[in-house]
């Protein structure tokens, strides 16, 4: 669960930053079509099967919904009348970002991230089931119960 929270936080942050960029549409379309399992296979080929490799794979594919949501919210907010009024009164980009754009984006995107947290847990678990996530420690030759011997 801790890995899923960390992955969700990283994906949300990357999605917010890239969603606020001006031309994210082409990259977003390209990356959103790649499934997490394919990213897991490619990442495992480079890093080997591990929990960090699975987390990296989910991060590579998981930021796209957050970027799309942030970009849509920003586009909607920029088209509203109070933004045009603020610009006509001489508001600069920093003022617009602090007082109009961030308050419109920051509440819905983390809420969306919390709703997607169970999906992140399932994707990490499925990568582990496929042998691409954290590996089980090797079994020792000792008996399972004290006082018994294996013959």
Image (cartoon, rainbow, N blue to C red):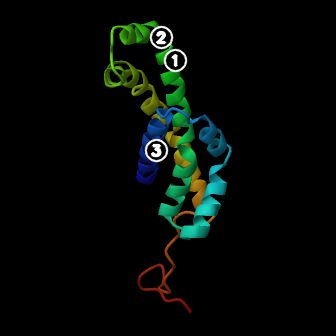
Q: CB under 8 Å between callouts 2 and 1?
A: yes
Which of these two is toward me, 122 or 95? 95
Quadrant of the rendered image containing residue 145: bottom left
Distance between the Cα atoms at labels 3 and 2?
30 Å
Sequence order check, earlier mark of 3 and 2:
3
Above or below residue 88? Residue 140 is below
Marks 1/3: CA–CA distance: 25 Å
Q: Is residue 115 visible?
A: no
Q: Position of residue 40 (x, y in %)?
A: 61, 58
- The residue under the point 50% across, 87% down is 141
Residue 47 appears at what percent x and percent y?
54, 69
Neighbourhood count class around disc 1 (C-alpha, 10 Å): few under 14, some 14–19, many 20 upward: few
Split into 4 quadrants, where in the image is the C terminus?
A: bottom right
Q: Position of residue 10 (x, y in %)?
A: 43, 46
Give me the C-alpha separation between circle 2 and circle 1: 7 Å
Q: Secondary structure at mark 3?
A: helix
Q: Is residue 89 left or right of residue 62?
A: left
Give x and y (percent) for residue 149: 49, 89
At x 63% / y 38%, what residue is drawn?
26
Q: For label 2, count other residues whose C-alpha is less than 10 Å away and answer few (under 14), some (14-19) or many (20+).
A: few
Element at label 2: loop
In the rendered image, which residue does mark 3 sit on? 8
Residue 80's tag is 2
Q: Name the residue: 45% across, 36% down.
A: 16
What residue is shown at x 51% (from left), y 79% (from top)? 139
- Closer to us: 58 or 17: 17
Question: From what the image shows, is residue 126 above or below residue 66?
Answer: below
N-terminal of the pair, mark 1 or mark 3, is 3
Tell me the residue that label 1 is attached to. Answer: 76
Q: Nearer the viewer, mark 3 or mark 2?
A: 2
């Amino acid at each position: 669960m801790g890995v899923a929270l960390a992955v969700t936080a990283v994906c949300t942050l990357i999605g917010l930053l890239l969603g606020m960029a001006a031309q994210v549409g082409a990259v977003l379309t390209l990356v959103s079509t790649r499934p997490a399992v394919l990213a897991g296979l490619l990442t495992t080929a480079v890093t080997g099967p591990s929990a960090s490799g699975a987390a990296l794979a989910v991060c590579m594919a998981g930021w796209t919904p957050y970027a799309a949501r942030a970009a849509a919210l920003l586009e909607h907010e920029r088209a509203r009348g109070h933004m045009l009024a603020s610009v006509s009164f001489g508001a600069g980009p920093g003022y617009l970002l602090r007082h109009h754009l961030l308050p419109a984006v920051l509440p819905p995107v983390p809420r969306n991230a919390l709703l997607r947290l169970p999906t992140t847990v399932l994707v990490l678990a499925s990568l582990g089931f496929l042998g691409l996530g954290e590996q089980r420690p090797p079994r020792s030759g000792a008996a399972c119960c004290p006082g018994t011997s294996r013959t």
